[in-house]
Amino acid sequence: MKNAFHVMLVPTLGCPSKCSYCWSSEEGSPIMSIDTVKDVVAWLKDFRDDRVTFTFHGGEPLLAGPEFYRQALPLLAGELGHLTPDFAMQTNLWRMTPEIAEILAAYHIPIGSSIDGPQDLNDLQRGSGYYEKTMRGYEIAKAHGLSVRFICTFTSYSVAFKGDIFEFFRENGFTLKLHPALPSLRDTNPEKWALPPEKYGELLVYLLDKALEHIDDVEIMNINDLCRCVFTRRGTVCTFADCMGSTFAVGPDGSIYPCYRFVGMPEYVMGNVRDRPGVDDLAASDAWKQMHRFKEYVDQACRDCAHIKYCRGGCPYNAIAPTGGEVAGVDPHCVAYKRIFDEIGERLNAEMLQPMMGMGGFKDAPPGIMALMRKIVMQ
Ligand code: SF4
Ligand code: SF4
């Protein structure tokens, strides 16, 4: 089965926020022009013939302003209608205005934003005033009927407050997607905020318990995805699928990269939309070959792991960015993935065996992985 076709559009690498652990924002970054959007359309017209999702990412994509979206969205939706495009956006919401919200609402664009927990904790990690600005944007988005989910970055500091963070999300009725802080490539002390893999694994098990305990009133996207992976034995999010060749990112100047995470790193440019490269052209680039070297590496390095089919070595960016591009290991979060996949697999097996062993059926058991799977299917 082919992986989902995903094109991330990065209108700018600039961002008005200064989060302590951020690794991606760039001061004074240019903004993508509408001519580049037209080049994206021309590039994709005959590139691949299946449904595409466009995610506007950054930097901070709202810095591109209302006029950009007013022109870009009809171009992408109209001229690429044969690819039945879906849209999404990842934004801190600071620059959300009623005008932009109205434009995005016309295309039913779901918003992913970022909040790290209660205001004090969030602002300590993301900077003073962040919480208020994001919440102001959230209210505008909500008033225009946009759906907003929050990514919560857990750091080596905030993980100690995981209970408070969970309660914050539960009490506010926010869907939680967690993100482990990565070592910053720009910091003199890159590990300062990074969440160690062992702690990440423990956190995932903690959140699995919380998701089951509060099955009717919380949504933790990573837990849903991890359970779905084990249950279907297939990676259902990019981290656990071979993203190479199905996911691309286009930077402000039209450069094509394997993912938004590489945007701004010249060694990962695979081509430019103005040249309308086909798959074969991109496949000739060093970046494409490097991504595929990672895939081959995983086939070998993870061949004896029980989870290889639905883990696929994790995220290639996580694996190769810290080594300066060398393929020398799998995603450093392997320890965490193993921990949570083992946990889910063991619980699922035990649940399957219960009725056969005369220990009662699913009806009598407290909510388990099967109950969560039923909930996900019904959504
Ligand atoms: S490089 Fe990582 S974040 Fe980017 S698409 Fe691949 S798995 Fe996802
Ligand atoms: S859990 Fe670790 S060893 Fe297993 S497939 Fe994932 S990265 Fe490879």
Image (spheres, rainbow, N blue to C red):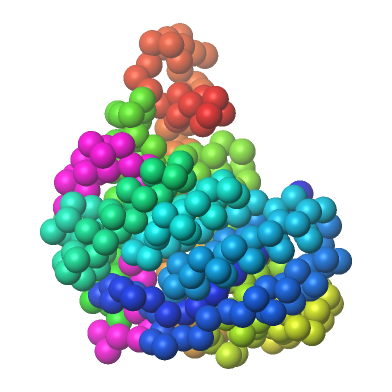
Whether 168 is among the magenta residues is yes
Which of the 4 image quadrants contains residue 196? bottom left
- Position of residue 265 measured from the top left corner of the image (x, y, whole percent): 53, 87
**Residue 363 drawn above or below residue 100:** above
Q: Residue at x 58, y 79 (%)?
A: 32
In this rendering, the count of numbered labels is 0
Is 150 on the left-hand or right-hand side of 357?
left
Q: Nearer the viewer, residue 343 or 274?
A: 274
**Residue 348 drawn above or below residue 84:** above
Q: Residue at x 48, y 59 (%)?
A: 100
- Position of residue 24 measured from the top left corner of the image (x, y, whole percent): 42, 78
Q: Residues in magenta? A: 161-189
Q: Nearer the viewer, residue 158 or 248?
A: 248
Which of the 4 image quadrants contains residue 258? bottom right
Q: Residue at x 63, y 46 (%)?
A: 234
Q: Nearer the viewer, residue 108 or 345?
A: 108
Q: Residue at x 27, y 43 (%)?
A: 169
**Residue 94 drawn above or below residue 257:** above
Which of the 4 image quadrants contains residue 93? bottom left
- Position of residue 18 measured from the top left corner of the image (x, y, whole percent): 28, 76
Is 4 on the left-hand or right-hand side of 326?
right
Whether 234 is among the magenta residues is no
**Residue 190 drawn above or below residue 136:** below
